Amino acid sequence: MRYDVAIIGAGAVGCAIARELSFFKLKVAVLEKSCDVAFGTSGRNSAVCHAGFNNKTTSLMARFCVEGNRLMEGLCQDLGVEYRKTGKFLIGFDEADMRTLEALVEKGKANGCTGLQIVGMDAVHAKVPGVGGIGAMSSPNTAIFDTFGYTVALAENAKANGCDFYFSHAVKSVSEGPDPYRFIIDGAIEAKVLINSAGLFADKVSSLCGVDGYRIYPCKGQYYVYDKIADSTLQVPVYPAPRPGIGGLGIHLTPTIHGNVIAGPSADYQDDPEDYCTTKPVLDQLLSESSLLLGSLRPGQIIASYAGIRPKQAPPSQGGFMDFTIKAEQGRKGLVNLIGIESPGLTASVPIAMHVRDILIDHQRDFGLDMQARENPIRTRKAPVRFASLDREEQARLIKENPDYGTVVCRCQTVTLAEIKKAIDNVLGCRSIASVKYRAWPTTGRCQGGYCMTRIVAELMKSGLKAEEINLRDEGSNLFWGQAR
Amino acid sequence: MKDFYDVAIIGAGPAGLAAAKAASALGASVIILEREARCGGILNQCIHDGFGLMRYHRALTGPEYAARAIDELEGMRIDILTDAFVSQLVDNGDKKAIIVITRSGLLTINTASIVLATGCRERTRGQIRTPGSRPSGVFTAGLAQSFVNLKGMDIGHRVVILGSGDIGLIMARRLTLEGAKVLGVYEILSKPCGLKRNITQCLYDFGIPLETGMTVSRIIGSKRLEAVEVSQVDSDMKAIDGTARIIECDTLILSVGLIPENELASDLGVKLDPKTNGALTDAILQTSVPGVFACGNCRKVLDLADLVSRQAETAGANAARHALGLGGYEEAAELDVSLPKGWPEKDVINCTLCPRGCSIAFKDGKALGYGCKRGLEYAKTELVSPMRTLTATVLDSKGHCVPIKSSVPVPRSSLVLLRQALKSVRLADHHSGQVACTIDGIEFLSAENG
């Protein structure tokens, strides 16, 4: 197959680029090693739309984050993604913290953030009772959103404009082809331009393309998930004042768009870019640090834990943040590298995509592209129905229309059969419980799938999968070895 | 369907069914709301036998026990609404409203009394906070039971079980019968939690080791489970460094506790035990909200379905009394009746024929401790050639799993081979209680609920 552009990686950034390029008359393919979008860093984070005060002024990180924060609400509206502007508090525990926060207000202003201010604990307690500390910085533009739904929506939008997705396709080789199809991927897919948005594997993909010298340092962050207590306990994310050199944002508490609270992440460098294990010492640290922020949290409310990995460019010896590297490589015509897209990459994903688009426009003659805008491209996606969030009249109307809305599959989150079927029958394909979960949000409640898992499996089998083909997450994570037949 | 019922019962497991019977017997109009397509609750997936020893004076499988409890409602004026998911309870003082999601629409059911018979859910890996990766192959015992018994799934071949509660023990036996190798059962407490009879019949029968004072301290494997790390624990139940051992396996079954299911109740303001999540009740099983009663596992997890049924009758009757303005509330009996738990004593046979569970020993050729002749015979047979009722599910012509049981106990040594032979059976016509198939001259009865 021949494409104008091949994008490696279907995280939020890869999918945002695919969507941006799908507005042009280009043939675009996305190659993803996992079986679905958002299986890497994009699906394993705090799900926060950052305001942009934390990054070095004049950096791409700061610029794209502030821009992304400005765009995100409208974008989520266009794409039917749940989004809530909660604001956020950074808590100071001593005078040194307060000075850090004051400096942060100034840095934020320089970065273009609006509304930042130092507030007393009474202002914090008015919104989040029980939080510890002596003072805080308020960031009114910070928001929480559904990162899975966001990435899915970007991909679906791109697909609707003709972009092809190749899942479970780990790129193994990239050879050089004759102009203009300079990239031959695994001997099968040819492209004029290769966009490396491979996240944790971006250094390796760059090397495959012949450009060495990058190195990604995986840095793990572990999280606890608390039961649905956010609505009553914590409606606004609370972070500790940043401490120098940690390379993360500190262990914080964040309400999720689905009503849980997550505590984390830790920040520990490791060699393996795919080791998502949680560890006892870090989980214990999460418990003690999160109870510093909010003493009322109880271990008994924890329902799950998970880890994500930051693709950092800053080596362990240096720590902290290094700016995104986004550029057309001189050494390999047509290669656009995105290296070190860690936090705030999710918030910045669409501005990053626009930047990549501009790079292609600048280089179109050189790359052999014809960047003509598509006529009336699709720019929106209809929001999936969330039965649980509707009022009773609306629920009744839906059941009348389709009785499958009257069968509740996931009891913790009240997800109906109609929503599960819709998630399974999505344009990107679905053969894992995780893919259903990312779209309709079953299995995420306090019973962790104890009730709904058998029902989701039954629906996946009705869609044509055999028992042994059903995975919990990615390929190889089969739930069953077979079934009596 | 009516606009108003004296008593509405949430859940049609053993608790809900017995509560309905008792409420209706006092003349109350009753509706049962059940989220599943059929009544019986978790009993439907408990295809092993041992239910009903107290209530029906015989050993029944779970589905058979459910079928009996349902049959008892016949002729009574009870509406049963299945596929009905209660989404909200509303307290309007004397009257309560129940919002129900069904395939024919959103229903509002008004009632004077509510009986909570919502059972319990399983504690999960996330709640016991086991570190490690998140591969497939980690199942709670009840979920595994449902997949294996109701769907015929082959969930794993090399199995480790964490927790010695009865469901874990039952699953150790089930998976062994299904052809898996159960490598061991690990219990964090210093003694086993399950019934003695289950330790004997589910573990010792198959040579499955049980170690106490141990936990799974890490889960290993990025895709499907590859191994678990087990460690000894100290008196705070924390893993002791340096005691870790790796066990290669593809499946981990968790039997680490049950949590009363009370989210609906707490929305209504029902006070819960902060430690167990069970609905708190007074002596007549009324919760902190007048007119709302609770029984069975949503109140406090009980060892036997028989006990659940008995308690639920009291709750159902009192709910009817509340609705009808009758006096004379009954107090719930103390349900300390229970079969013996923990390590079976050496050289002692625990009789399983009745709820008494006599401990029978032989000394100098003389039997001691038996309570009846049948018990003595049981103990003698147990010494020379133990016999067991084999239960399993087999497929019918439509590919559905049908629970069956041997019409008589079979030699313990033949259990695994017989189970394997049953795998090639396809049932034609079958009726509950009647012979469904015959293997090696042994008759198997359909033990289906309904």
Image (cartoon, coloured by chain):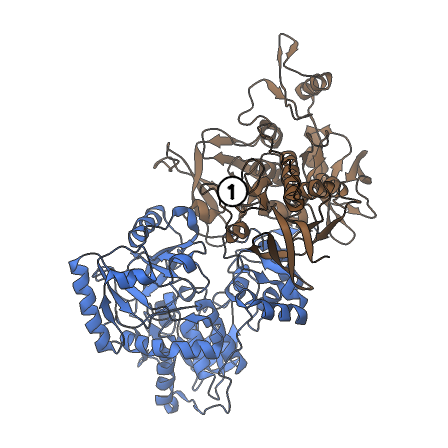
Q: From the viewer's perspective, is residue A121 above or below residue B55? A: below
Tell me if mark 1 has few (under 14), some (14-19) or many (20+) residues whose alpha carbon lies within 10 angstroms of its own.
Answer: many
Q: Position of residue A33 (x, y in %)?
A: 47, 66
Placement of A190 over or under A101, stated as above or below: below
Q: Is residue A210 left or right of residue A400?
A: left
Q: Secondary structure at mark 1?
A: loop
Left or right relative to A121: residue B138? right
Q: Identify which amino acid the numbered label 1 is placed on.
A: Gly
Q: Looking at the picture, how far across and down is residue B383, in whole percent?
A: 66, 19
Mark 1 — residue? B278
Which of the pair A369/A85 is nearer the observer? A85
Residue A306 visible in the displayed image:
yes
Would residue B158 be found to the left or right of residue A293 on screen?
right
Q: Nearer the viewer, residue B261 or B379?
A: B261
Say which residue appears at 16% left-offset and 59% top-offset.
A95
Q: Quadrant of residue A63?
A: bottom left
Q: Chain A appears in which tint?
A: blue
Which chain is in brown here?
Answer: B
Looking at the rendering, in which quadrant would you find the N terminus of chain B?
bottom right
Residue B109 figure quarter: bottom right
Taking the image as drawn, is residue A334 in sight?
no
Relative depth, front residue between A268 and B237: B237
In the image, residue A252 above or below residue B430: below
Mark 1 belongs to which subunit?
B
Q: A464 left or right of A53?
A: right
| Residue farthest to the top, as pictured | B364
